[in-house]
Image (cartoon, helix red, strand yellow):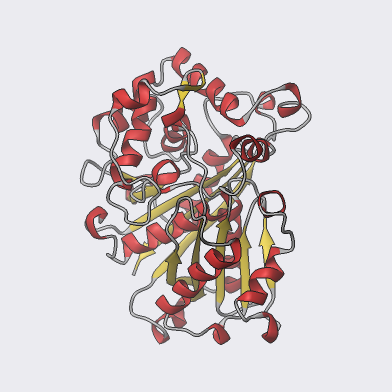
Amino acid sequence: MKEVAIIGVGATKFGELWGSSFRNIGIEAGMRAIEDANLSGSEIDCLFIGNMSAGRFINQKHIDALIADYSGMATKNVPAIRVEAGGASGGVAFGQAVTAVASGMYNTVLLGGAEKMTDQNDAFINTAMDATADAEWETGMGLTLPSLYAMIARRVMHEGTATREEIASVAVNSHFHGALNPGAQFRKEISLDTVLRASPVADPLGMFDCAPITDGAAAVVLCPLDEAKKHTDSYVKVSAFAQGSDTLALSQRPDITSFGATVATSRKAYEMAGITPADISIAEIHDDFSIAGILALQDLGLYKKGCAGKAFLSGETKVGGGKVAVNTSGGLKARGYPIGASGVAQIVEISEQLRGKADKRQVANAKYGLAQSVGGTGSAVTVSIMEAV
């Protein structure tokens, strides 16, 4: 298997992009990544696209062909593959793209992730997102994705491994970094009190504990590591990619205060990269709900159980605050959550950090960065580790 490098990255601004169509934002991100890699579109051998629900959000299926067509790659018969795994769609698509290059099947691959969500009303969008849970035994019984994560939060608080204030501080952390990211949907810091006093969504979670509805796209270009220097001096190495699954329904798990797929997948990723959690300088984690941030840091082995919330609350997870900077992009909570694009956007942020191009949110002397993408309530998880070259 060949070693793989990321040689170009690009993203649109995240937010309410009412003036742009799905195809436009996807192509914009892809062209930025290709330009960053000093390539032309004719040099791309294969295209992967992470997308959860274009069939419902914009009534367009077969989006692999759509993007290939409007990017000009269809006339060259470049293969295009759409990948869907709920909130982990972008993360899984990244893994497929890495595998395609590592295996030698394709040489230069463009990976994109995109979602256009704000053209629909909130009720419609939330119904589509709830479909990432078990339709028969969860949503069919009246449960929603927020209520499932609220159950997790309640149990964590009951067991005493995180307080309500510590859970809320995950959102404060993300907004702190989002204020430094010109591409984020919400570029404003928030206080702990703001999170705690926000209107309720599913007790104990309020509005500021939940990621927003977002439009946006992100893209990266991959090639064999030994060919990266032919294109650019600014690239990073993909040291590991691992993927794991768990039961679709939360009720089938022996413990809902930990995502077993994250635990197993991260262990495999660390082993592949030849490192330990202590080597990670930056982590982009899947904070679609604030409680998910607490679970992620513990399941990834970055903090012991009961310590992640304290790290968020103390500011230890901010840039310059401690051993690992968490969600320097603003995370799903502040950067925004265009579902299919989120996992790819994490890779973009880690790559920018490791290349020293993150501007005001730059982590000093970063060597390894980690991205964790999650579908549903932890039923699909990917962990990717990138290394500065």
Q: What residue sits 74% from the left and 63% below the top? A: 62
| Residue 260 in picture, x, y percent from top left | 57, 35
Q: In the image, is residue 193 above or below residue 330? A: above
Q: Is residue 304 left or right of residue 263?
A: left
Residue 1 seen from this side: no
Q: Nearer the viewer, residue 173 or 237?
A: 173
| Residue 233 in picture, x, y percent from top left | 33, 79
Q: What residue sits 46% from the left and 39% below the top? A: 287
Task: Work out which quarter of the rendered image holds the N terminus and state it.
Answer: bottom right
Q: What residue sits 45% from the left and 40% below the top? A: 300
| Residue 216 in picture, x, y percent from top left | 50, 56
Q: Is residue 170 left or right of residue 253?
A: left
Residue 169 seen from this side: yes
Q: Residue at the front extreme? A: 19
* Residue 114 lies in quadrant: bottom right
Q: Is residue 77 left or right of residue 200?
A: right
Q: In the image, is residue 310 above or below residue 157? A: below
Q: What residue sits 58% from the left and 24% below the top? A: 147
